Amino acid sequence: MPVLQGILPVKRSLVTADIAAGVTLAALAIPEVMGYAKIAGTPVIAGLYTMLVPMLLFALSGSSRHLVVGADSATAAILFAGLSGMATPASAQWMAYAGVLAFMSAGLLLMARVIRIGFLADFLSRTVLVGFLTGVGVQVALGEIPGMLGFSAHGRGLIGMMINASGRISHASVYNLLVSAGTLLTIVVSGRISKKIPGALMAVIGSIAASALFHLQGHGVHVLGVIPGGLPSVAFPRIQWKWDLIDRLLPIAFSMFVVILAQSAATSRAYAARHNERFNQNIDLLGLSLANIGAGLSGAFVVNGSPTKTQMVETAGGQSQLAQITASIFVFLVLLFLTAPLSYMPGAVLSTVVFLIGLELIDIRGMRRIFFERPWEFWVALITALTVIFAGVGEGILAAMFLSIVAHTRHGYRPKNSVIKTDENKRFMPVPVSSPEQLAPGLMVYRFTHSMYYANTEQLSREAGDLVKGAKPRLRWFCIDAGAIDDVDFSAAETLRQIAEDLKGRGIRLVLAGVTDHVHEELDRSQLTQLTGKDSYYITILDVLKAYQAEAAQNAQ
């Protein structure tokens, strides 16, 4: 099993920077993971546990030098939405289910590693990911407003909860509002001054001190209360295994698996490209699987590759997984010696931290870019976001997968094909099929710009037929430029045979240019070569033109 790929080789000149980045990561991420624990419906201590064993296991076994693994808002939101109605949040049963989901996610990741399907992450387009995370951000941010005001709200779904909250606005607490405003101001102002200032940590420390000194709990401010200190116990989740329970948990685990697969791979790929480094996606899948096994055993919840934490380390100058190991050691010390002060933390502080996390996920700039650059894809992103907001995170994942496939299919369903002509300088240039130019009198070159498969065979047949029927002068050769074709399925091969037979009946020869070896083998198996002849394949369009002109000259004699 490959280990330490994210650490070795160790560069002595960067060790100090990695250690400093690890301390910075811990300082910035501790309030964040406590907020994610709140999103997941688990005790806040479980958020700290995600930065202990899981983070350490990935640092030792992953291939990426930069990807930080820990609690994440998207998977936390899926966990909460999936378990709602199955158990009471933060209860022993809830935590047992959370542990089982971590094991299930680990199993799916390990299966993906064994059968090497990490490429599935590529089927979640950047468009739908922007929409998905925006929807999650809206849902998370709006869901924390009651907590920031000092009261709880219930209801079916986000809309039901917001309706309930609007009716309880009179229960808002002035002291909770002041705590939330102070937290918000501290984080926003410190972030404007410098991204390296741990504004969230400053807000947490300040609120703990104010809560202890001024006894805010006596003024109606809810505090976290006693938080168990020490290290987590290592044990399997205790549940009664039943098939109906597995049936209910498996879709939740699969939704989280898809997010982990897509988000972790995208983050690793982005930072590897930034630093001109390589990473092995399949090895990272193994590391993510081990990290989630560690989460399930240590009382944490599902962990994921985190873009925000990865950027924290990048900004702080970290260059390897040594930074993450340092952060785990820092959290180890916090768990041993500093959990008692956390009991004074006002709940409004965590609600505010989570609220800001939600706002950061709302990618207005990304949605605007999609709208101006690809209007059709903007509606895909918007539908994904609205599905998350109004239907739920799990449904949003399914919508994201479906819409990604639809968007991909659309690009191949109606390819922008063309015909080839020569300009005044005798250079080949494409023109729309609506302008049926001939490369030479009697020779037309039809360029097909996508793989040929069942969905676009009707377009292939229609365009080829229209070009041949409308050609003036009458065609003698019809060439298909196959340089962009990397696959031909059974339906497309059958259509090509029909086109070849129709052309042969009209006294027109079908030839192909730029056919790859793979496509050539497919056409041989489909007996198209037997129909058109082995001499119907040419390397380039220029070769087709020369052969056609040579035949025309020979016929003229």
Image (cartoon, rainbow, N blue to C red):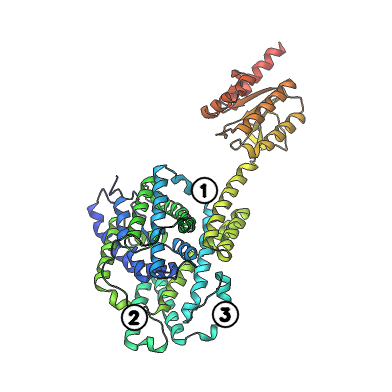
Give the residue number, with chain letter if any, for mark 3.
Answer: 166
Q: Which residue is mark 2?
A: 344
Q: Is residue 270 found left or right of 335 in the rendered image?
A: right
Q: Position of residue 432 (x, y in %)?
A: 69, 38
Say what secondary structure mark 2 lies in. Answer: loop
Depicted 322 relative to depicted 81: above or below: above
What amino acid type should be assigned to the residue bearing mark 3? Ser
- Residue under circle 1? 123
Res. 497 image quadrant: top right
Q: Position of residue 343 (x, y in %)?
A: 33, 78
Q: Quadrant of residue 333?
A: bottom left
From the top left corner, tell me how far across and down residue 184 is, in percent.
44, 77
Mark 1 and mark 3 residues within 8 Å of each other at the beta carbon: no
- Going by the numbered disc 2, the residue's amino acid type is Tyr
Disc nearer the start of the sequence (2/1): 1
Crowd band around label 3 with a 10 angstrom C-alpha radius: few (<14), some (14–19), many (20+): few
Quadrant occupied by the N terminus = top left
Label 1: element kind: helix
Q: Compared to 476, does 164 lie above or below?
A: below
- Per the model, the C-alpha gap separating discs 2 and 1 is 45 Å
